[in-house]
Image (cartoon, rainbow, N blue to C red):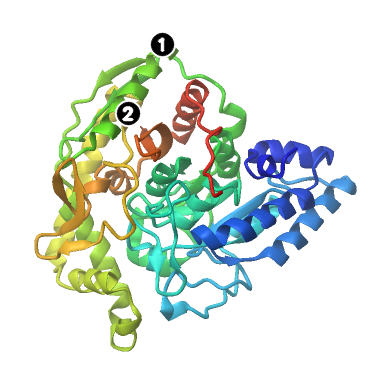
């Protein structure tokens, strides 16, 4: 087997080969490490590789097999972890100079669960400071590049994770999503990412979770839908430290993945009632993909969902959270912060308690709108993003007064959130949502389709994703670094 084929193998297949020792975890891990050493200097996906730790964990995984010990479901499988999630003894910077030399004293809940399941930790992946934006660069580690075009962004804020997975530098990644940060880079990098129902995966970092409240979800970023189900089986389940966390389902996502839902009702929307613009290439790819669902004998109808534009309420929550958390750091650290992050902090400090209360009420109305629609449909399909990956830095602030970005889509300059109109409403509502590749632009850039499910129903989202993956597999495409 070619080394590159090992790097692009599914995690589920790796698990089976490790069990039989047809391939050892050490062989798989060392092959991926070789690729990291070759490719990571090009794309900057890993900010803190933990290669010696990975070698040690791989050796322990193989030892468990040889000693016929009970194996966790991730035994010997390599995993990357976003640099917002703590790993004991490893640097966690949050992409910020403030925490440039911070070494974690404990494992995050998810890292502890992954360790117990037998994983091999390859390292930490790059993120913008505190995940504040949809591109991936920071003043500590620099810019992460899109593996399909090195002049384009991989998206963010889990851009390092997605770039690593797309490049064969890890079969599994843990990402986080406060407004699209799993789905954005999954769309731009041509892979699969799932934001579960809020609460399905527990939070333990109250520094981040505290100020961003109930917007942030953690979830898997992978190349194969079955690998998302595998990792989600490890991640889910309540924890005493998170009062919003939900009990573990009484079934395995992986075991039920290939069960085809019957009489499924799919509704689709190309604007959610408020989106500013949509690239024609994206529109065509998504419409072509939607038609393929009819081969599965599922009903497909255009949705009448009209969400009241949620941009202002999202900005109220998002910026006020950063303002609350980082105002105390401004005096000492302002000159070592991303200027756009400083703008976000200052913007957030302008909101009153009345503004926040109004935003809370508006949020509940949007939740009701989406939930009512999901009484008529089991799944909502939208584009993941309004455009394919754009040039690095293009989404930045053009005019803070008018809240316009530098990005032009279909001949229209869009707002700062205009290019991700389809992702953040489902952080507002908390519904599960995934991005799956559905096409390619004329420039060879991936295009993503979003699959949204009812609250608590990640399983149907995964099953629909798996059914689409069978119809339109994408894993034969690989970035070319030669």
Q: Residues within 10 Å of mark 1 (few under 14, many from 20)?
A: few
Q: Residue at x 77, y 38 (%)?
A: 17
Mark number, residue 297: 1
Total count of labels: 2
Percent across and percent down for residue 424 are 29, 48
Q: Nearer the viewer, residue 105 or 93?
A: 93
Give the mark nearest the N terminus, 1 or 2. 2
Which residue is disc 2 drawn over?
Answer: 286
Q: Is residue 7 above or below residue 132?
A: above
Q: Residue 142 falls in which quadrant of the image? A: bottom left
Residue 110: tell me if it is visible. Answer: no
Secondary structure under tag 2 reads helix
Choose mark 1 or mark 2, whichever is in front: 2
Q: Residue furthest right?
A: 67
Q: Residue furthest bottom?
A: 332
Q: Residue at x 25, y 72 (%)?
A: 345
Percent across and percent down for residue 277 are 18, 40
């Amino acid at each position: 087997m070619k080394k590159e084929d090992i790097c692009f193998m599914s995690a589920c297949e790796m698990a089976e080969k490790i069990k039989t020792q047809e391939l050892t975890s050490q062989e798989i891990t060392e092959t991926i490490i070789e690729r990291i050493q070759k490719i990571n200097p090009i794309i900057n996906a890993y900010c803190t590789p933990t290669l010696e730790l990975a070698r040690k964990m791989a050796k322990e995984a193989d030892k468990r097999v040889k000693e016929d010990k009970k194996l966790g479901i991730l035994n010997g499988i390599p995993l990357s972890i976003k640099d917002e999630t703590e790993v004991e003894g490893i640097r966690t910077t949050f992409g910020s100079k403030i925490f440039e030399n911070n070494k974690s004293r404990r494992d995050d809940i998810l890292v502890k669960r992954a360790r117990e399941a037998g994983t091999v930790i390859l390292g930490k992946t790059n993120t913008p400071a505190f995940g504040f934006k949809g591109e991936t660069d920071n003043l500590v580690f620099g810019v992460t590049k899109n593996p399909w075009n090195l002049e384009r962004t991989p998206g963010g804020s889990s851009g390092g994770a997605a770039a690593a997975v797309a490049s064969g530098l890890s079969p599994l990644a843990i990402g986080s999503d406060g407004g699209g940060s799993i789905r954005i880079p999954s769309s731009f990098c041509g892979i699969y990412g799932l934001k579960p129902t809020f609460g399905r995966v527990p939070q333990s970092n109250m520094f981040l979770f505290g100020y961003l409240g109930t917007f942030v979800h953690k979830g898997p970023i992978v190349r194969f839908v079955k690998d998302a189900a595998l990792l989600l089986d490890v991640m889910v389940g309540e924890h005493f430290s998170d009062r919003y966390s939900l009990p573990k389902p009484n079934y395995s996502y992986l075991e039920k993945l290939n069960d085809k839902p019957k009489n499924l009702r799919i509704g689709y929307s190309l604007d959610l009632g408020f989106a500013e613009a949509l690239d024609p290439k994206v529109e065509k790819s998504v419409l072509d993909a939607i038609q393929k669902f009819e081969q599965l004998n599922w009903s497909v109808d255009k949705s009448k969902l009209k969400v009241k534009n949620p941009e202002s309420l999202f900005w109220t929550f998002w910026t006020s959270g950063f303002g609350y958390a980082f105002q105390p750091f401004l005096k000492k650290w302002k000159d070592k912060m991303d200027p756009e992050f400083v703008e976000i902090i200052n913007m957030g400090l302008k909101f009153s308690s009345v503004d926040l209360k109004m935003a809370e009420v508006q949020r509940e109305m949007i939740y009701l709108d989406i939930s009512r629609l999901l009484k008529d449909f089991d799944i909502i399909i939208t584009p993941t993003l309004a455009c394919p990956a754009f040039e690095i830095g293009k989404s930045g602030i053009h005019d803070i007064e008018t809240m316009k970005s530098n990005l032009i889509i279909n001949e229209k300059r869009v707002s700062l959130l205009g290019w991700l109109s389809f992702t953040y409403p489902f952080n507002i509502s908390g519904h599960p949502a995934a991005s799956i590749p559905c096409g390619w632009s004329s420039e060879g850039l991936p295009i993503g389709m979003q699959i949204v499910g009812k609250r608590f129903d990640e399983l149907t989202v995964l099953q629909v994703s798996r059914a689409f993956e069978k119809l339109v597999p994408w894993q034969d495409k690989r970035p070319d670094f030669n």
